[in-house]
Image (cartoon, coloured by chain):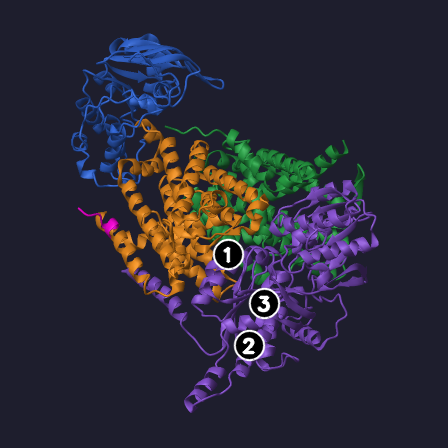
Amino acid sequence: MLQVKKLCKTFGAVTAAENLNVNIDVNSTIGLIGSNGAGKTTFLNMITGYLSPDSGSIFFRDKNITGKPPRYITRQGVYRSFQIPQLFDSMTTEENLEISKSIAASEISIDGNQEAKVESKNQSVKEILEKFQLTEFQNQTASNLPEGTRKLLDIAMALIMGPNLLLLDEPTSGVAAEDKFKIMDMIMNVVETETTAIIFVEHDMEIIKKYTNRTLAFFNGKIIADGATKEVLSHPSVKANVLGLTSQDSKL
Amino acid sequence: MPDKTLTFTSIAALTLVISGGVLPQWAIFLVTVSLCYGTVVLGMILLARTGLVSFGHGLYYCLGAYSAGTSKLFWGISDLIFMLLTAIILTATISFALGFLLRKYRSIFFAMLSLAFSMILYGLLSKSSYLGSTDGFNVTTQTIFGYDFLDSGYARYIIFLITTFTAWLCCFLMHLYLKSNKGRLADAVKDNELRVEYLGASAAKIIHTNYVISAVLAGLGGALMAISIGHIDPEMSYWTTSGEFVFITIMAGTSSVLAPFFGSMLFTTVRSFAYEYSPDTWQLLLGTTMLIIIIFLPDGLWSLFTRKKKHRSV
Amino acid sequence: MKSFKIKIALVTIILCCFSKAFADDDAIKIGFISYLSGPASSDYGLPAKHAAEAIIKSINAGNAPTPYSMKGFSGTQIELIFLDEAGGSTKQVTEFTQLVMRHKVDFVIGYLSSTNCLAVAPVAEKLKILTILLDCGTARIFEENDFKYVFRTRSHSTMDVIAAAKYFLTDHPEIKNFSGINPNYAYGRESWRDWNAVMSILAPQAEKQSSQMPKLHAGLYGSEISSLARKKSDVIYSSLWGGDLKAFLMQASPRELFKETKLILVAGEPNLQNLAGFIPDGTIVTSRGMTSGMMENDSKLNRWLIEIFQEKSGGLATYPVYSTANAILGLKKAYEKARLTKLQKAVPMADVAGVQDGMKQAYLPPNTKQIIAAFEGLDFETPNGRVEMALGKGHQAIHGTSYGTTRTKDGKVYTENVKFFPAKEVQPPKNIKSLDWILNGFQLTK
Amino acid sequence: MNSIVAIIIDGLVYSSWLFIVAVGLTLIYGVMKILNIAHGSFYAIGAYTAASLTGSWLALGYDQSTAFLIMLFSAVLVGFTLGPIIERGILKYMYQRDEIVLVLVTYALFLMLEDIIKLIWGVNPYFLYQPYGLLGSFEIVELTYPNYNLLLIGCAITIGCFLTWFLQKTRHGKILLAVIHDREIASTQGINVDRVYFLTFTLGTVLAALGGVLTAPMISVQPGIGAETIVMAFAVVVVGGLGSLPGAALAAILIGLVRSGAVHLFPDLDLFSIYLVMATVLIFKPKGLFSAQEERQI
């Protein structure tokens, strides 16, 4: 479904992506691991159009989306959530979801491309509110929500139209440790996994182990390991360069 | 379910039309001028809801006024409706073109670039002796739908009616627009443009659309002003004129389509009286008012009317 | 609760403002508009305002010399309402309407800027209110329109240009070239256009060199001065005024711009003494038709004006003061003439009731139509000589003007070689636009 | 050839003036993110203070060359009085508000100060003509220039160098740079942002007043000079890139030269040459000539 070929990106002297090659199919759940600055978020940002790569190409469902603006890519069914929740702060929870739905559902042509429509798998706002246990917050202004709830709403907004590819940037960061599985369960519950692929960036290896069937390990802008989660986690280079650091972090 | 704002708008417009028959002439004139300002500010509100403040909306205000004013000169027609139409067409065309550029800008840069454009127009008009340079020229509106109303003795009242009707219509349509899915995107863009993009909509396009709408409203306001004042000059494009619109926008608040009309009514009244009773210190008064409103009523005067509701809901 | 109080307060403020508007009494109310703020206030707007106050005070007390010695206007006291002219024509039209409709002023005197004059005149016409324009140079007002309710009791600025050229050419008929520096707005542009037209007729050999158009109130003129200095023209023509003129001279004189170049100033700098130290000797200046300390004028009226103005403001009577005197005295003359005509016409006839009614009618003040009839074509004495309402179907005044050259001595500016130009020499006759008159070689037709 | 020399000299003199007038504005924006319209009023108040103080000083019969000291004193006096009053009294409570709201706050202040100036100094113009001719003049390509123009250029260079040195080499300056770079990080690292704002605003006010002080000898100091100047200063700051010191310098030179060229070659274009430069630069460099590309953290 998603083919990434020879993707490269540098910021000045820093190499954020070096010759990345990834193929992703439907019905897979993929974790991205790596220390801070290893290139995980840059990878997400390039797929979703926030950054355009220096070279290389990205195809989604055989359509070249390299360097296209986010709205174009979104319209192909690639939705994402953010590490720092990106909400409409002056609106209520319900309005946030309503407006997300109305944008996604409207048939505004993007750059004259009429084909680029979302194949809607309608979830109603109510359903989403219930599934994410947001109903009690539905009339609260987004800026007043607790951080964990903001995170949930952010993810819910990405999910409302039933994406074909869902990218989550640290879905459980800033969430209380006891809630993290709850959140992941909710997400998995909503996504129709048979037609959707999920990629998420995560530091928490328990989550990675529990929810992913494939993992990409990033180090210095390169993918140093790609495969079944178990294998990747036991890969020596991953142990040294990724897990070594993260385990140290968790000790601190 | 009838919409409260729409009902109220219509009642207010009707009351105005009826009271126009009894009000003294000077009050009618003051209200007409306020409604013209209000129409411009209505557009500014749409921009403000989109998160943008233009320090150069005088550009369209002035263009509207000049296209209405020159229709006699260029087309030989001095029909009120025709004048309004030319204003709409001209401002829509120019704002559509400039919009491609301005939609890339936000915040101060948007404010400054629009200021630059309005000052360029000011420069051009000041240079053109053909259009009276900085002195401008007088505008005569002879007919409406072909009916010669100028010498009927009701000229002022008819202009007042047309202005009220236009203001009401704009108010009505704007309210519906703001309620619609497309209109609500304005708030969304203001809140979080990035998210809007990641939901698949183009923030630039939304801004462009709203920019054109607000420009047309400014043009309409300018044309109506030209018709009711009877004189136009390049000062309408000077940055201080735009500053006044910004002032009213901030003073009135952006939460309701009625706020701009309320705001400009208050503004013209207070200015008129301040001018008279303290001609030496009216700027001091204006500045102080503005500061007080910004400090104590950040959402504008209109929030006085809506505050209660908010308390209830929280 | 709190917001409710604020609402009440707001509404009360608005209501108070409105109710104030309905006070009324018997005095004649005159709205007086001039610049009370902004760059034009210090030299133009405020002297005009002070002059109006001083003149009205003196007239109300019956202290003015003949023929203006009657108290008030025919005995009725006069009240002034002042407004600021700053802020653009949209605001001016609004305020004008307010003044007339809400305050029910009987007459309006005012406006220094041509923009405001042009904007207000048609409104005055619509509202049928007698309005006297105070200054505003542009000839367009009465050349492009026929106004019935609008008068201007001083000449338009074409006179300044023609007289300047005539004055200069008497001593320098062989002029080879000229340059100009004029503010970039309607007055400056019009003035420069007229000058070029006059030169093309009176000195066709003269070549136009540099034509500078700095922004109004630009402040710094370094580049303009260099550009003018490089041309070394015989003469520089300038319609800069007020602070702009002062800044220009302050910057130009240390740069020796005027070593070989003469300077003509046509904007009638109201207070030449302000320029002491910067204004080069031999600069050609005009009084713009007003006495302004340039001409010896020992008339009673002039002494009166100088004295009351001195008393009011402590300053010298400058040309806005004389403009104001023209407007007020002209109006007084017209008003009293109208009343007199009315009384003369009111011959008691027929039955007793008719006599009483007739007398009553006769003693009512004259209405605007009657005053207009008296005003049209009026000629009257002013502190700076005779003014005749000769153009624009009797609505536009003409009068003579004088030019002189400056010499600074002991920190004071004196004018020498003052030459007077009678009205007919520098003003077009009826029925021709001034620019056409100039281009026709000062003839009605070629 | 001569005309090119004249264009360059005139342009540089005008550029220096623009830079002096605009530098305080860009500094305040850089640190505090306030586009300060009241800058124009500070400029006017500086000019008024210099004109009235120096005028009465010279009237006492002191040597004319001491005028420059009094002028400098005026700038410092205005800056150290007005800056703290306005920053502590009003702006301090506004920092969490939107950039545009802050513009409006300073616009309100500008309106108020315009009338306060009138209440203090009246509407009659003030003159401070002595210093302009005092320094003599020099001649080049058959044109005479007063040495005061050199003083202006000198002041502009001195201010530019001083600020650069201050920002790059001193501790306080480095703190300012840190705040310019990222307000939040700076405050988490123990920098007292509140104090930095206070000092910056005072310094900016001194610079604005200095602009007025240095201009006073060339103009008639009268109501309305602030409004005319602030628009110029805006143009410079926006073209240069808001908050950038080298940007302001380059923009001042660019605008100065373009305007001077227009005056010499196409005098009719003078009126909007500045806005044309502004629009043109912004079309191609939306954030001005020098500006850090902001990358949003997501």
For residue A93, which quarter of the picture?
top left
Which residue matches tag 2? Answer: C338
Q: Which chain contains the residue that carries disc 2?
A: C
- D154 versus D292 height, above or below: below
Query: CA gap, disc 3 to disc 1?
Result: 23 Å
In the picture, measured across the screen, residue B288 lies left or right of residue C159, that is: left
Chain ID for label 3?
C
Residue C232 appears at what percent x and percent y?
Answer: 79, 43
Judging by colour alone, the chain drawn in purple in this rendered image is C
Determine the image quadrant of residue A4.
top left
Secondary structure under tag 2 reads helix
Q: Is residue C203 above or below residue A85?
A: below
Q: Earlier in the sequence, mark 2 or mark 3?
A: 3
Q: At which x and y percent is residue C204?
A: 77, 45
Q: Colour of chain A?
A: blue
Question: Which residue is at a point 51% across and 83% down the rendered structure image?
Answer: C346
Residue with the mark numbered 1: D112
| Element marked by disc 1 | helix
Looking at the rendered structure, the secondary structure element under dot 3 is helix
Chain ID for green: D
Is B2 magenta? The answer is yes
The C terminus of chain A sits in image quarter: top left
> Circle 3 sits on which residue?
C49
Write down the chain letter for disc 1.
Answer: D
Residue B255 visible here: no
Residue A237 x %, y %: 35, 9
Callouts 2 and 3 in the same chain: yes
Instruction: Check disc 2 and give the amino acid type.
Output: Ala
Q: Which chain is orange?
A: B
Residues packed near mark 3 inside 10 Å, few (<14), some (14 to 19) or many (20 plus): many
First to last magenta residue range: B1-7
